[in-house]
Amino acid sequence: MLDFIPKRYVFSIVGLAATTLSVALQTNLSIAIVYMVKNTKDDAATESFSECGLQHEVAFNKTEIPQVTTGEFDWTPDMQGIALGAQYLGLAVGYIPGGRLSEVYGGKVTMISTLLMASVLTALLPLMAHWSIYAFIVCRFLIGMGTSPVFPALVYMISLWIPESEQIFISSFILAGYGTGAFVSYVTAGALCASDFMGGWPSVFYLGAFSGLIWCVWCFFTAYDSPSLHPLIKSEELTLITKNTSPQVEQITSIPWKAIATSVPFWALAAGFLGQCWILSFFVTSVALYMGTILNLGSVQNGLLSCLPNLLRAICACIVGILIDYIRSKREIPIVYIRKGATLANSLAACVGFVGILFAGCNVTFSTIAFITAGIFSDFYIFGVSLVPIDMAPNIAGTLSGILCFLSSVPYFLLPGMIGYLTKDEQSIAQWSYVYYFTIGLVIVTTIIYLLFGTSEIQQWGTDPEESKQTIQDTDEKSKEFVKTEISVISDELVRGIRYTQQRRFS
């Protein structure tokens, strides 16, 4: 049944579901916590007297909403923040081990085991919340660890499953779940919390856990670590994949950490990855905050407008991915041009959009358009910097992707902290402008570094550990020769300068 469907497309659908589930399990608390925590206040307290005034909700008065009490947990704002941020710490801790596990034991086993853990823990969240806020936070941390291997594992599996001629679109399709997952999570969580189904907010976690269990069973029976292991793949498809994927040598049992740490292309890639993920982190952590505290949008409108860039960026990446694959089928384009072009396009759009936000002021329509402009190409990072590990180091693409994801987790901590510090005394466009200026500057610098020093050429340390050792030795020797040459040239120039000065003095 359905044997006519190419198995790489089956893998793509399973991968899309994995990314969507991963993000949904990470973000469901953002909405649910509003209904979980006690929040007793009247309308007078909720009005914001910022420079933009209150949008849409100003017509309500005290007689219409005399007093609203929601939630059952008396958690302080600090504890709420820790609960929301615990998952990001778990993500940072789990990225590198997750990538390495996918190389050693296979992406399928790694994702099933870790997402199964995350799903079970998600089901326990309501119980943990009633028991102890600290137990709840620990669960959120472990859920972050459980969802972290998905990205590096899929990057590694894409290098095995997807031919280069289809890699741009299919990778965009698979990893688009990081955009659509947030959209689905916000919409479903809001609807479930507002209902009486299974007690309201607990249903968010129960449904997420159930979805995770279903995915694990589905993946177990339909996904395989590589095409050669699939029992039902047709020989034509297997040949197509084998001839058009990155070369795979023997498994690297020892990661060449020194070679990676001394590699200029790696650090250039890390800089580019940081800049692209800073843009993404802004839309994950800060758009709703800006719309709520500065533009003073109502909760419903804020939620819808905040989700819009996430959905549009995923759709845009898939459409552009199809066009790029089509163009590459007609003419040969070096993959490095695709990687750097996608990175440059995203950076330019983001900078233009962030400048537009500053000029939009309190205009909600213009601000929304500017946010969409800034984020419309955000998922270009998928076929930009995200897939460079496949180009540079196909045999350790999972580990390399995990390292980059670990580095890219910095914005998810730093950006909210910076916003909190800058706006703790004054919620204004002027204070937020410093956030946008810093973001624009960071994106420009990191993009230039990647464009100048980044590459998609295969690195010796990414294919064979013995070659990586030789690479380090060759690099050291070349560095010594370079230094000797430079010293010799400088010495010669100094001697010539001294002689010329003496001749001028005596003449």
Image (spheres, rainbow, N blue to C red):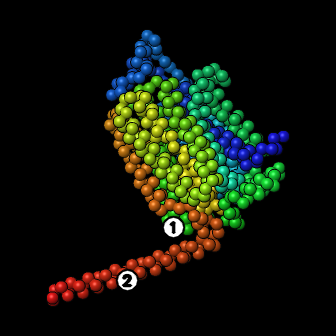
Task: Assign the N terminus to one quadrant of the image.
Answer: top right
Judged from the image, the secondary structure of the residue bearing numbered disc 1 is loop
Which amino acid type is marked by label 1? Answer: Thr
**What's the residue at 42%, 78% (across, down)?**
483
Which amino acid type is marked by label 2? Answer: Ser
Q: Nearer the viewer, residue 389 or 153?
A: 389
Q: Nearer the viewer, residue 214 or 7?
A: 7
Q: Where is residue 251? Give x, y as percent.
A: 70, 64
> Gap between marks 2 and 1, in whole Å?
25 Å
Between disc 2 and disc 1, the foreground one is: 2
Left or right placement of residue 439 versus residue 264 in this view = left
Q: Is residue 234 visible?
A: yes
Left or right placement of residue 268 versus residue 428 in this view = right
Left or right placement of residue 108 versus residue 435 in this view = right
Task: Assign the C terminus to one quadrant of the image.
Answer: bottom left
Q: Where is residue 409? Give x, y as percent.
A: 52, 49
Where is mark 1, residue-wise? 262
**What's the residue at 67%, 65% (across, down)?**
252
Above or below 450: residue 127: above
Q: Which mark is residue 11?
A: none
Q: Nearer the viewer, residue 26 or 159?
A: 159
* Badge 1 density bin: few <14, some 14–19, many ≥20, Cα 10 Å: few
**What's the residue at 39%, 78% (across, down)?**
486
Above or below 268: residue 350: above
Where is mark 2, residue-wise? 488
* Badge 2 density bin: few <14, some 14–19, many ≥20, Cα 10 Å: few
Judged from the image, the secondary structure of the residue bearing numbered disc 2 is helix
Q: Where is residue 143? Give x, y as percent.
A: 62, 42
